[in-house]
Amino acid sequence: MGIRNENTGLEHEQYTPDFADYWDDLVGWKKREEGEGGFYERLLGASNCETVADVACGTGYHAITLAKNGFKVTASDGSENMVRKTEENAKQMGVTLQGTKVVDWVKASKDLGEETFDAIICLGNSFTHLFEHEARRDALEELFKVVKPGGMVVIDHRNYDSMLEHGYSSKHNYYYSGKGVDAYPAELNRYLARFEYVFPDGAKFQLKMYPLRQDYVSHLLEDAGFINVVRYGDFEKPYDRDEVDFIQQVAYKP
Ligand code: SAM
C-alpha cells in the first residue's frame, strides 16, 4: 500500500498500473451500464448540462459512456495510471473526449486551467479516498469553483451508514459487478474501511477508505456553497436507508 500524501489525502499509489489493469474486470462495464440504466444521462440531461468534468475518471467508464451519449466530457483523475487507462479505453472504443488530465481535487481550479463546467461528477465511491476533514472541505471548495453558476455536482459513495450500523452486505448489482470478482471489507470501523478485491486468477488488491456518512457529505456540500442537495439510493428516490448499497448525492451551484 502506498504512503498517503498528507496535503491532499491522495493515495495515488493505491492504484498501481497492475490494479488499474484489473479495475475494468472489477467494474464490469456491461453490467454496470445495465445496473445504472442511464441514470446519469437522464440526470445531467434534465439540467441541460453539456460540458461535464469527470474528476475521478478511473479507467473511464462514466467519461466514455457520457461522451458516447453526446456530452462534452473532460476526464481527469489524481492517478496518472488511471488517466492513461482512460485514454487507452477511449481510443479503443473510438470515443472522443474533450480532454484528459491528471488533476488533484484539492487543486482542481488550477489543474483544470480555470475552465468551468455545467457538471462535475465524482463517482464510483471516489470521494471516500480523502481521510482528513480539511482535505474533503478544501476539495469541495475547489470543485465548487469549477462548476458554472446553475450547474451541478454529483458525488456517490457506498452506504457506509448501513455498513457501520448493520454490517456489510451487498447485492453487487450496480458497481463491482465484474464476473467472479469478490469485494468485501476486511476491516471496518468508524474511521476506516479497508476493502479487499479478489479476482478469479487469485490476484488480490486492497483499498483503504474513509467511511462517509450520508448526512456528513450533504453538509459538506452545503458548506462548500452548493444548494438543494438531493440524494438517491441505488439510483432511486425515495430509498430505504438500510437497504441500498450506494448513495448518489446531487447538489447545485446557485
Ligand atoms: N470513477 C471511477 C469508477 O467508478 O470506476 C473510479 C473510481 S476509483 C474507486 C477512485 C478514483 O479516485 C481513483 O481513480 C483515484 O485515483 C481517484 N482519486 C482519489 N483521490 C483523488 C484526488 N485527491 N484527486 C483526484 N482523484 C483522486
Image (cartoon, helix red, strand yellow):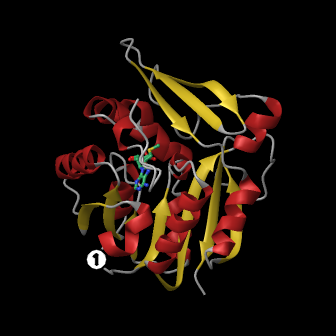
The quarter of the rendered structure image containing the C terminus is bottom right
Q: Is residue 52 visible?
A: no
Residue 109 in the figure: left or right of residue 236: left
Find residue 153 and report its image quarter. Answer: bottom right
In the image, farthest residue toward the front: 6
The quarter of the rendered structure image containing the N terminus is top left
In the rendered image, residue 227, in percent from the top left (x then y), is placed at 67, 79
Residue shown at the point (33%, 59%) measured from the top left: 76
50 or 228: which is nearer to us?
Answer: 228
In the rendered image, residue 133, in percent from the top left (x then y), is placed at 62, 57
Q: Secondary structure at mark 1?
A: loop
Residue shown at the point (58%, 54%) measured from the top left: 156
Disc 1 marks which residue? Answer: 113
Residue shown at the point (64%, 69%) measured from the top left: 221
In the rendered image, residue 248, in percent from the top left (x then y), is placed at 63, 56
66 or 133: which is nearer to us?
Answer: 133
Residue 69 in the figure: left or right of residue 222: left
Q: Is 220 rendered above or below residue 240?
A: below
Residue 49 in the figure: left or right of residue 214: left
What residue type is disc 1 on? Gly
In the image, farthest residue toward the top: 202
In the rendered image, residue 218, in percent from the top left (x then y), is placed at 70, 64
Q: Is 243 rendered above or below residue 155?
A: above
